[in-house]
Every structure is written in structure tokens, then in C-alpha cells.
């Protein structure tokens, strides 16, 4: 693919031209040369949750912990330049999943199928994502406890784990003890600002939207985009939790795909995994923990006999436990194509080669920050914002049409050409609290087959209504004096599928929403947390799989309802809390 070649050429250029001037790659956590036959804990998946779990469980010196990751090492120079985040998709460290075609969304994408990038690398999707950090609304977690019946998951209970994971570069006298300052994960607002950043903020103020610290308890307003970056580079969960430590009781196995959970009766006793075409069996004394994410965790459960009875029977997989695994799939839906032309370039440094040199020598400039500079949270309902607007100082790059799964023809119809003589920016609305639900199903009983992903976006009519409201708010902000000072004009695209509607009418925007919808990469909910008598639940409030001993799920899949915010931080919080739940459980067993 064209963009893969571009990344490779860029990488060679960096090494050849800049040589010793390029920062060395960070020291990796060493892979284990000789595995034990048995470990106390086996963690499946070295992503955002798995890295945090491996660190915290291995704090107990007499516990042996094995972390198994399907991908390889994270590479700072190739993967961690923030401004090239989008280029990480559809590479060898992405699972490269695609959704099943459906009739409600993504209609102008090739085969009506939406790209679902997931990290296949140590650090997981925190190596692919756009690095935006949020906690979610406090009311979200209160709903987890009070509405969905999960004691211990209210915001008062989880707040301590956010503080534990955070190293927030912020000075907020009004909230002196609200944020963590010495945790593993560094969070900051990037230093680089385009010429448009003050105009974004001022225009939002002129539209009646106040500045607000959206990481704090108040969830409506505008501010900079908080990122998991440090010293100009991406700061993944791998760099936060594994790179700083070296422990004899924590073993790491890379490039190894777990294909099956092993059971003795209803007790998980180990896993099978494949590495370099050889199959290995490793046993657990205490627990197997799935942290493979909202797609791979349910896939592995179903392959191992835990899932919907009828679905497993159709694939001739022996049933161990009938549970609604793979249901309740949620995601944040984003809408592409809202582009604005301006009368000058927004970047302080315009030349692409100079931007690259500035980053390589100083780790500053446009490449030190993914272009989303400003974020608006809007429409508060029961303490929870319903949608987000992201202001991005960039054009849609023509070579990126493959990443969104558009044909070149549709891309030419829908998006502003990136060779225009003036500047441009775009804003995309994001639906925070979708009512639509999707599902994950197995394609067959082959563990190496990609699962079938039914996103089911926009199947609930309220989701469309909220996105139209989001677009109207974006247009209102764009019409304010501070942005009009740049000659800001909405680009009237030429999307043939919507040509029967008057441009800028509600009917037109509904059409564009359905045709240019895409994922914000926040899949969650497919192993829903809830009490045993809840027929939709897969795990309990201590993250144990219902009816199974020695098996927990600790990742985004346990969310009973998706959060209003980017979910990488909350996933790490789940792992921090999950680690303490496990420690307390086994401490009580020892006492007993």
C-alpha cells in the first residue's frame, strides 16, 4: 500500500540523513528467553490494560506473572511521532480489522465497511491512537454502579485509580488535589500551537461556550486537547508501565497469539498460544486474565467455549458456559467532511521538510502534536456531555483515503483538495453516548480468522439527531468573528450520494452523516460488567467471568456503558483497579 511505502521511506530518511542526531529508541522490557511451564497469573494482551496489570501484579514479589502479546516491540522513531499517528494504521502493528457492511452508516466507504484499527504491538492501541486523554464524566461511573449494579465502580471509588495512574502536567489552584502528579502515565497539553488555536478558543467563547478544564468535574466547555505525550513523543502504556521496570518475576512473550483458554471443569488452568508456527501450552496456578481488548477478548472467550450457545453450536465449538459474549458493542461515532477554507496557512512552519527537521532535532513543531488542538464538550444531560467537537488544524491528506476506506473517487467528491493555495482546517463531531449497539461474532472456529464486527452505527434515530445538533454547533462556532477574521468558509463538497438535498439543510447533513461516518476507535462493552442475574452481563463487579473460576476480563470490553470521553485513560484505570481487586482477593484467600 502506498502509505506503507511512505512510512518506510521516511524511516530510512530519518536514519540516513540524521543518524546520531536522532534520539535513541527507549530501552525495551526484555523478552523472556526461557518460559516456565506454570505461572501464578497469565495476562493475555499487552495493550493499555495488559501493560498496567503486568506492572501492578508483579509488584508482589512471590507472584510469577507472564504477559503474552501477539505483536512485537514498540519503536519510538517509527511509531511514536504524534503528527504521524494516522499513518500507524494499516501497518504490521495493526490488526487491520474491518466492520461487516451495513445499511445505516459508512455508506460511501468501500463495501460500506469501516476500518477498525487495533494495536498489535506492545502498548496495544495506545501506540495507534490519537493520544487524547480524558477520564470521562463522574456521572458515567455513578451509572456503572447505580444503574448497572456494579458496587465499587462509582466515581468516588475509581477516582483514586485515576490519580494513581496520572502524571498530569497542570497547575490548577482551584482543584489542588484533583489530579495525579506522580503516576506512570504523563498527560499534557502539547506546547505547539498553530495560528488558529487562539481563534478556535475565542470563537467558542463568542458562541457562548466557556473555557473549562474538561479533565475536571465540570464537563461542558472548550479547552486544549490533553494528550499522552512527553518530550515531543507519544507516551504509550508500554512506555508508562513496562519500560521503567525490570523484574525477575515478570516474563514477557512477544509475537505470540493465544488461541485457546484451557479449562479443567469450569476452572481456567492455562492457555495455548502460537509463536513462529509452533504451539505452546502454559498453565496458571491462580488466574488467566484477558486484556486483549473489546474485539479480541470476546473472540478468545468464544473460541474457548464461553459465549452465546446457538452461535457456538453453529460453529461446532463445545459449550462451556452460555453467556452474551460479544454483545453490547459500543463505539464513539465521528463524522468526516466538515472542512473550512481560510485565507492563509495555519502553520507557523509551512514547509514539510522543515517541519520534519524541526521535530527530529528538537522534538517540537507541528509533528510534536497530533493536529487536534481544541476540544468542545457539549449538551449536558444528567451530568454527562452528549457529544464532542474536535478542531483539527490540517486538511484531509489525499493519500489517507485508504485509511478511512474511501475510494479515490469518493474522496475527490467529498473532501477539499489538499493542494489548494490557501489554508484549511476541519472539525469533526463525535457522538459520545450512542444508543445503537453492535456485536462481535466469530467468522469460524479458526483462531486466526478475523472476527465479524457488526458496528451497527446510527441504527437508533436519536444518534442521528445528536450528530445534526453537533454539526449545527460547529457551524455556529465557525461563523464567529475570531474565525471569520481568517476568512473562514465552509467547503461545499460534491458528494454525489447527497446531491438531491439542499446543501446545509438538515436532510443534507443527515445524508452526509450516514455516508461519511467512521470510528473514533473506542470499541467497548462486549464483555459487559453486571450482576449474575443480569442476562446481558459477562463479568461481575470483580471482573470475574460468570460461572467460571480463575478467569477475569480486564479491558474496555467490561464497560457496561461507553464513557463520555476518549477511553484510553479509563481503560488503564480499569486495569489499576482490577489489579487491586486481584491482590485483595488473594490476600483474603490466604487469610482464609
Image (cartoon, helix red, strand yellow):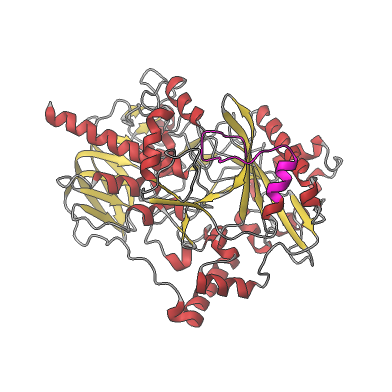
* Residue lying furthest top: 533
Whether the magenta-drawn stretch holds residue 215 is answered as: yes
Q: Residue 337 in the image: x percent, y percent?
A: 72, 49
Image: magenta residue range = 200-221
Q: Residue furthest left?
A: 591
Q: Observer-nearest residue: 352 or 224?
A: 224
Relative to the observer, which residue lies in front, 457 or 174? 174
* Residue found 60% across the figure and 67% down from its top: 2
Residue 447 visible here: yes
State the residue at coordinates (52%, 60%): 88
Magenta stretch encompasses residue 100:
no
570 or 207: nearer the eye?
Answer: 207
> Residue 277: horizontal and vertical position, in percent?
31, 59
What residue is rendered at 57% in x and 34% in y? 219
Location of residue 406 by image quarter: bottom right
Image coords of residue 160 (percent x, y)? 37, 36
Residue 27's place in the image compared with 570, above or below, is below
Left or right: 43 as drawn, with respect to 399: left
The count of marks equals 0
Q: Residue furthest front?
A: 173
As drawn, is 124 to the left or to the right of 221? left
Residue 446 in view: no
Q: Identify the image quadrant of the C terminus.
A: top left
- Please identify the quadrant where the N terminus is shown: bottom right
Magenta segment, principal secondary structure? loop
Q: Position of residue 22 (x, y in %)?
A: 45, 75
Amino acid at each position: 500500500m502506498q502509505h506503507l511505502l511512505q512510512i518506510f521511506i521516511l524511516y530510512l530518511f530519518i536514519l540516513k540523513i540524521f543518524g546520531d542526531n536522532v534520539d535513541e529508541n527507549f530501552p525495551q522490557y526484555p523478552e523472556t528467553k526461557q518460559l516456565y511451564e506454570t505461572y501464578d497469573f497469565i495476562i493475555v494482551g499487552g495493550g493499555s490494560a495488559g501493560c498496567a496489570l503486568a506492572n501492578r501484579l508483579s509488584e508482589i514479589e512471590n507472584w510469577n506473572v507472564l504477559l503474552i502479546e501477539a505483536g512485537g516491540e514498540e519503536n519510538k522513531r517509527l511509531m511514536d511521532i504524534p503528527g504521524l499517528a494516522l499513518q500507524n494504521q494499516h501497518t504490521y502493528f495493526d490488526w487491520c480489522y474491518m466492520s461487516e457492511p451495513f445499511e445505516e452508516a459508512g455508506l460511501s466507504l468501500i463495501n460500506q465497511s469501516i476500518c477498525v484499527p487495533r494495536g498489535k504491538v506492545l502498548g496495544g492501541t495506545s501506540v495507534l491512537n490519537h493520544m487524547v486523554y480524558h477520564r470521562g464524566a463522574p456521572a458515567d461511573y455513578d451509572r456503572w454502579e447505580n444503574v448497572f449494579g456494579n458496587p465499587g465502580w462509582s466515581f468516588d471509588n475509581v477516582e483514586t485509580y485515576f490519580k494513581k495512574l496520572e502524571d498530569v502536567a497542570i497547575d490548577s489552584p482551584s482543584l489542588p488535589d484533583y489530579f495525579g502528579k506522580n503516576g506512570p502515565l504523563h498527560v499534557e497539553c502539547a506546547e505547539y500551537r498553530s495560528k488558529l488555536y487562539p481563534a478556535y478558543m475565542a470563537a467558542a467563547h463568542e458562541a457562548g461556550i466557556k473555557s473549562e478544564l474538561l479533565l475536571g468535574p465540570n464537563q461542558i466547555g472548550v479547552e486544549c486537547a490533553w494528550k499522552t505525550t512527553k518530550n515531543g513523543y507519544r507516551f504509550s502504556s508500554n512506555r508508562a508501565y513496562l519500560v521503567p521496570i525490570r523484574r525477575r518475576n515478570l516474563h514477557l512473550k512477544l509475537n505470540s497469539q493465544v488461541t485457546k483458554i484451557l479449562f479443567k471443569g469450569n476452572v481456567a488452568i492455562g492457555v495455548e498460544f502460537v509463536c513462529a508456527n509452533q504451539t505452546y501450552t502454559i498453565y496458571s496456578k491462580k488466574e488467566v486474565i484477558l486484556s486483549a481488548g473489546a474485539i479480541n477478548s470476546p473472540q478468545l472467550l468464544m473460541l474457548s467455549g464461553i459465549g452465546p450457545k446457538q452461535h457456538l453450536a453453529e460453529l461446532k465449538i463445545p459449550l462451556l458456559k452460555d453467556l452474551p459474549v460479544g454483545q453490547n458493542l459500543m463505539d464513539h461515532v465521528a463524522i468526516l467532511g466538515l472542512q473550512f477554507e481560510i485565507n492563509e496557512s495555519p502553520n507557523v512552519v509551512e514547509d514539510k521538510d522543515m517541519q520534519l527537521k524541526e521535530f527530529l532535532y528538537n522534538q517540537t513543531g507541528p509533528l510534536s502534536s497530533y493536529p487536534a488542538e481544541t476540544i468542545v464538550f457539549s449538551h449536558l444531560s444528567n451530568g454527562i456531555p452528549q457529544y464532542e467537537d474536535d478542531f483539527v488544524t490540517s486538511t484531509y491528506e489525499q493519500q489517507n483515503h485508504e485509511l478511512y476506506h474511501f475510494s479515490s473517487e469518493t474522496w475527490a467528491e467529498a473532501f477539499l483538495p489538499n493542494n489548494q493555495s490557501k489554508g484549511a482546517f476541519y472539525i469533526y463531531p463525535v457522538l459520545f453516548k450512542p444508543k445503537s449497539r453492535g456485536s462481535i461474532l466469530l467468522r469460524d472456529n479458526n483462531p486466526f480468522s478475523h472476527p465479524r464486527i457488526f458496528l451497527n452505527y446510527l441504527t437508533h434515530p436519536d444518534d442521528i439527531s445528536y450528530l445534526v445538533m453537533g454539526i449545527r454547533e460547529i457551524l455556529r462556532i465557525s461563523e464567529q468573528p475570531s474565525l471569520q477574521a481568517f476568512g473562514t468558509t465552509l467547503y461545499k463538497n460534491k458528494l454525489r450520494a447527497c446531491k438531491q438535498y439542499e446543501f446545509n439543510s438538515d436532510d443534507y447533513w443527515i445524508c452526509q452523516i450516514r455516508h461519511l461516518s467512521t470510528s473514533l476507535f473506542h470499541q467497548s462493552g462486549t464483555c459487559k460488567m453486571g450482576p449474575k442475574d443480569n442476562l446481558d452481563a459477562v463479568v461481575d463487579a470483580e471482573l470475574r467471568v460468570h460461572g467460571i473460576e480463575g478467569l477475569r476480563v480486564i479491558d474496555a470490553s467490561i464497560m457496561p456503558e461507553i464513557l463520555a470521553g476518549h477511553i484510553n485513560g479509563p481503560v488503564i484505570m480499569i486495569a489499576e483497579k482490577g489489579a487491586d481487586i486481584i491482590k485483595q482477593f488473594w490476600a483474603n484467600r490466604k487469610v482464609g
